[in-house]
Amino acid sequence: SFPAVAADTNQVQQKPWAETTEGTGLNLTCLHPEIDADSTQWYRQLPDQAPQLIAMAVRGTKAVLEPEGTLFVSADRRWSALWLERPRRGDAAVYYCALGH
């Protein structure tokens, strides 16, 4: 089972849509200026599948293996960016950020 993540769009802001051409890097951001998260997680939900944790960090930069890229969490822990290095067609999915406390 997977814990439901409630998104308060006033507290946590993600762009609802992003696109790129295959092989061209893409940056996904998550802003939460009122919350300094203890940890930041990013999940990817492929069509007809449950969300999967793909990256987690407290702050700074962390390599992401699948899909290949980098997670950056700001020093004040109030925003993060997931950089997808060379996205493939199969990486088309819903990407969620979640904040740990």
Image (tube, rainbow, N blue to C red):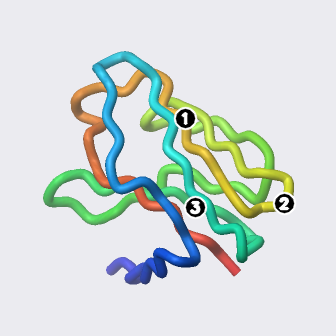
Q: Quadrant of the N terminus?
A: bottom left
Residue marked by disc 1:
83
Residue positioned 72% across, 51% down in the render: 73
Of label 2 and label 1, which has the lower sequence position? Answer: 2
Q: Residues within 10 Å of mark 3 (few under 14, many from 20)?
A: some
Disc 3/disc 1 C-alpha distance (Å): 14 Å
Q: Secondary structure at mark 3?
A: strand
Residue marked by disc 2:
76
Q: How many marks?
A: 3
Q: Nearer the viewer, mark 2 or mark 1?
A: 2
Which quadrant would residue 101 be assigned to in this image? bottom right
Q: Type of residue at label 3?
A: Gln
Disc 2/disc 1 C-alpha distance (Å): 19 Å
| Residues marked 3 and 1 touching at CB (< 8 Å) | no
Residue marked by disc 3:
41
Coordinates of residue 46 in the picture (x, y in percent): 24, 51
